[in-house]
Image: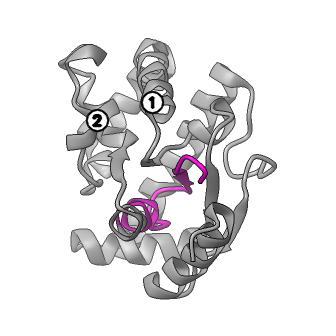
Amino acid sequence: MKEKIIIVSGFAGSGKSTLAEKLAGYFGLKCVHASDLLRQLQGKKAEELKPEESKAGSGWWETKEGKEFIKKRLADKSMDKELDKLLLKVIDNGNVVVDSWTMPWLSKKGFKIWLNVSAEERARRVAKRDNLEVSEVIEKINYRDTKTAEIYRNLYGFELGKDLKPFSLVAKAEKTEEAVFEEAKKALEKYFNCK
């Protein structure tokens, strides 16, 4: 049986954390949220982090503090590099679902899923989650998308959201969470030969 490694990616508000957690629960795997670990690196070293205790996003990246941290990352790529080394180790240990922007390109292992969702739909989801106005959120996620893509283009040379070659499944995630989960689950059961 294949080692179970699943990597879920997509822009802010695409549902990657939710899908990662659902797939981890279904397949009995650990779930690791890269953005939470990256945020923790502001005050800790990578070896102090506990990837299996990471939490799904809660809107922090859309705050003023989150925006300032993105600017810091644009100037200093060391935290991103540190996180990516840690995530590669987590993936090498296997039996994990990782929601990450970089691992689809940096890891040769795993079944990789990209969640394709329009900026407008993602803004609606984040606005509902964080009790904000859609117009306010769309500006914030557009900023985050653009700057995050710039960080990884400068650091690794890939085009986040444009280069979809690494992905085993590109899911049109405008549909319900349950429909996206079912599509991913069926593809993974076939991939892992476990149904």
Residue 20, horizontal then vertical, whole percent: 42, 60
**The stretch drawn in magenta includes residue 7:** yes
Name the colouring of the figure.
one colour
Give the magenta part as a residue range: 1-21
Residue type, label 2: Pro
Residue 154 as seen in the image, left or right of residue 145: right
Residue 66, horizontal then vertical, whole percent: 30, 39
Residue drawn at 38 percent across, 71 percent down: 26
Residue 7 as seen in the image, left or right of residue 126: right
Residue drawn at 28 percent across, 54 percent down: 56
Residue 99, horizontal then vertical, whole percent: 45, 49
**How far apart are the two marked residues, 1 and 2, measured between alpha carbons?**
8 Å
Query: Badges 1 and 2: C-beta atoms under 8 Å apart?
Result: yes
User: Which numbered disc flags the more N-terminal residue, 1 or 2?
Assistant: 2
Element class at badge 2: helix
> Which numbered disc covers residue 68?
none
Q: Is residue 160 above or below residue 135?
A: above
Residue drawn at 55 percent across, 37 percent down: 147
> Which numbered disc covers residue 87?
1
Q: Is residue 172 above or below residue 37?
A: below
The residue lying toward the viewer, choosing from 35 and 64, is: 35
Assess disc 2: are there few (<14), some (14-19) or many (≥20) residues with their C-alpha within 10 Å of its C-alpha: many
Q: Is residue 24 above or below residue 118?
A: above
Assess disc 1: are there few (<14), some (14-19) or many (≥20) residues with their C-alpha within 10 Å of its C-alpha: many
Can you tell which quarter of the image residue 64 is in? top left
The residue carrying mark 2 is 51
